[in-house]
Image: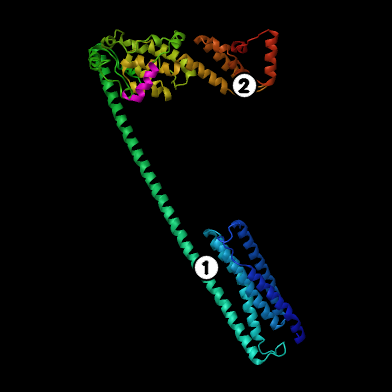
């Protein structure tokens, strides 16, 4: 390239350099304390924009520098572009430091990483430029008037600048690696601490679970041992009573008699003098505290609430045979010998009674079966109490669990169950709840129509049996039922009312 061409390029480079310096001077740190009106978020976005612009300027300058090196262009222009690139990198570094101060600590690593990646290419290009200038050191100067001293000084400065840039880049990389190692160490220690805490909690939970399991197993073993002992004692007493009452009784009769009781619990039968002695050992009603559950204040209040009878409810439940039972069983009956012959036990029907789970909708049917199979039999109160306890589960079981197998409390247990699950208003409310929850009738679906009809008929029969006729006429209940019907059926229902001149329809009308 001629001297004239080199001279023409100089003003352009000088002008760009001045613009860059002016731009660098414009980027000054903005202090939040001096200008509180500047929004932090806007300031961060502005710095990121400036940083991106500087990166773009560096990229363009590198492209020009590589082109000059490839074409062995003017050395003066190459030196000017090197200086420009160094200034642009410094400007980007300045923006990056400002962002470092504004952004939270968790973003510092990404900020430093951005600058290292951005400065890597300029440093390599600058180093390459200085090597290129060193190779062309023996060439004559492209600009007239430059002496040997000026050339050697420039060459030395170029070498020093290249070494300084390389040293700065290596130092920056070393600092970043150090910080990364420190951060990784901190993160690893934190993860180890969290893992130790997690394992400690897991181990503690496992130990607690094992302890509770052991306690439950021990409790179950103790209970099984007690039940086994009680069963053995009962069998011994039954054998003794059988021998004393009727020596001719066969072992098969005894086995059938024992089968009347459950496998888990067996209660003594009052036969002969031995059972009379057992009755004398029982706690007298009124002198002995009630079972443990009843002694508890909370349960006592609940049971007292169960025994409290509403006069209106009593008037509506005159058909209930439980209401006529005394609160406790007659003590004289407990001490009287059984008059029924041993062969009676052969006639006791096999227990096929379903278990009552506390659903008021099932109370009436279950109670009727229990009365026919158990209550009206000639079994002792202890035997009846045993069958009662064994044929209730869930909520019903929890209501009378405190009475255990005490025959004195047989009538009281029945009253508790009736007061909790068999009161007319409870049964009525259960039927209304079922009506509100029944699935809407689907058009042209015989199954859903049949299910809905069953619910309505059960309500009608139950309410009539309990004397709740006003609830059958209640407009709200009729409306609740009608809303379950599809539109075509509602239309037919309205036509039926108009055709038969029914002004106030009831659930009975709907059932028909």
Point out residue 425 in the picture as x, y percentages from the top left corner. Answer: 48, 15
In the image, what residue occupies the spot 53% across and 9% down? 464
Is 298 colored magenta in this rendering?
yes
Q: Which of pointers 1 and 2 indicates the residue nearer the eye?
A: 1
Point out residue 267 in the picture as x, y percentages from the top left corner. Answer: 31, 19
Q: Which residue is mark 1?
A: 176
Point out residue 133 in the picture as x, y percentages from the top left corner. Answer: 65, 84
In this figure, what is the number of numbered marks? 2
> Which element type, helix, strand or loop, lies under badge 1?
helix
80 or 171: which is nearer to us? 80
Residue extending farthest bottom: 148
Tell me: 430 left or right of 492. left
Is 16 colored magenta in this rendering?
no
Quarter where residue 292 is shown: top left
The residue range painted magenta reads: 295-307
In the image, what residue occupies the spot 31% across and 30% down? 223
Point out residue 24 in the picture as x, y percentages from the top left corner. Answer: 64, 70
Q: Is residue 253 visible?
A: no
* Magenta span dominant secondary structure: helix
In the image, what residue occupies the spot 62% across and 13% down? 510
Tell me: 36 left or right of 245. right
Quarter where residue 42 is shown: bottom right
> Which element type, helix, strand or loop, lies under badge 2?
helix
């Amino acid at each position: 390239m001629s001297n004239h061409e080199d001279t023409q390029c100089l003003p352009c480079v000088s002008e760009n350099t001045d613009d860059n310096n002016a731009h660098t001077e414009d980027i000054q740190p903005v202090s939040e304390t001096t200008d509180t009106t500047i929004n932090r978020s806007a300031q961060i976005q502005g710095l990121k924009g400036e940083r991106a612009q500087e990166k773009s300027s560096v990229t363009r300058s590198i492209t020009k520098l590589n082109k000059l090196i490839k074409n062995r262009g003017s050395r003066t222009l190459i030196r000017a572009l090197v200086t420009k690139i160094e200034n642009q990198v410094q400007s980007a570094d300045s923006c990056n430091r400002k962002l470092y101060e504004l952004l939270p600590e968790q973003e510092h690593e990404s900020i430093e990483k951005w600058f290292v990646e951005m400065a890597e290419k300029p440093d390599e290009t600058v180093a390459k430029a200085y090597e290129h200038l060193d190779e062309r050191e023996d060439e004559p100067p492209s600009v007239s008037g430059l002496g040997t001293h000026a050339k050697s000084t420039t060459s030395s400065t170029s070498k020093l600048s290249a070494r300084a840039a390389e040293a700065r880049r290596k130092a920056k990389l070393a600092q970043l690696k150090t910080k990364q190692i420190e951060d990784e160490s901190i993160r690893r220690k934190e993860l180890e601490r969290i893992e130790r805490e997690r394992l400690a909690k897991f181990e503690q939970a496992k130990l607690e679970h094992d302890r509770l399991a052991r306690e439950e197993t021990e409790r179950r073993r103790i209970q099984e041992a007690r039940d086994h002992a009680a069963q053995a004692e009962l069998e011994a007493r039954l054998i003794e009573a059988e021998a004393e009452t009727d020596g001719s009784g066969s072992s098969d009769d005894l086995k059938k008699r024992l089968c009347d009781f459950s496998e888990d619990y067996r209660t003594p039968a009052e036969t002969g003098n031995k059972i009379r002695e057992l009755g004398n050992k029982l706690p007298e009603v009124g002198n002995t505290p009630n079972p443990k559950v009843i002694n508890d204040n909370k349960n006592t209040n609940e049971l007292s609430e169960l025994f409290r009878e509403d006069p209106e409810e009593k008037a509506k439940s005159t058909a209930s045979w439980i209401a006529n039972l005394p609160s406790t069983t007659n003590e004289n009956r407990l001490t009287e010998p059984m008059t029924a012959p041993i062969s009676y036990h052969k006639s006791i029907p096999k227990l096929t009674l379903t278990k009552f789970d506390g659903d008021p909708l099932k109370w009436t049917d279950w109670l009727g079966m229990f009365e026919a199979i158990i209550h009206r039999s000639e079994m002792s109160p202890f035997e009846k109490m045993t069958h009662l306890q064994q044929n209730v589960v869930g909520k019903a079981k929890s209501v009378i669990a405190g009475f255990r197998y005490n025959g004195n409390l047989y009538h009281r247990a029945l009253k508790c169950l009736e007061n909790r699950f068999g009161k007319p208003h409870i049964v009525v409310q259960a039927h209304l709840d079922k009506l509100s929850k029944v699935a809407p009738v689907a058009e042209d679906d015989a199954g859903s129509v049949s299910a809905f009809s069953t619910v309505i008929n059960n309500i009608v029969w139950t309410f009539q049996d309990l004397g709740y006729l006003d609830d059958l006429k209640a407009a709200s209940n009729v409306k609740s039922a009608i809303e379950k019907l599809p539109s075509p059926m509602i239309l037919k229902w309205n036509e039926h009312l108009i055709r038969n001149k029914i002004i106030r329809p009831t659930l009975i009308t709907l059932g028909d």
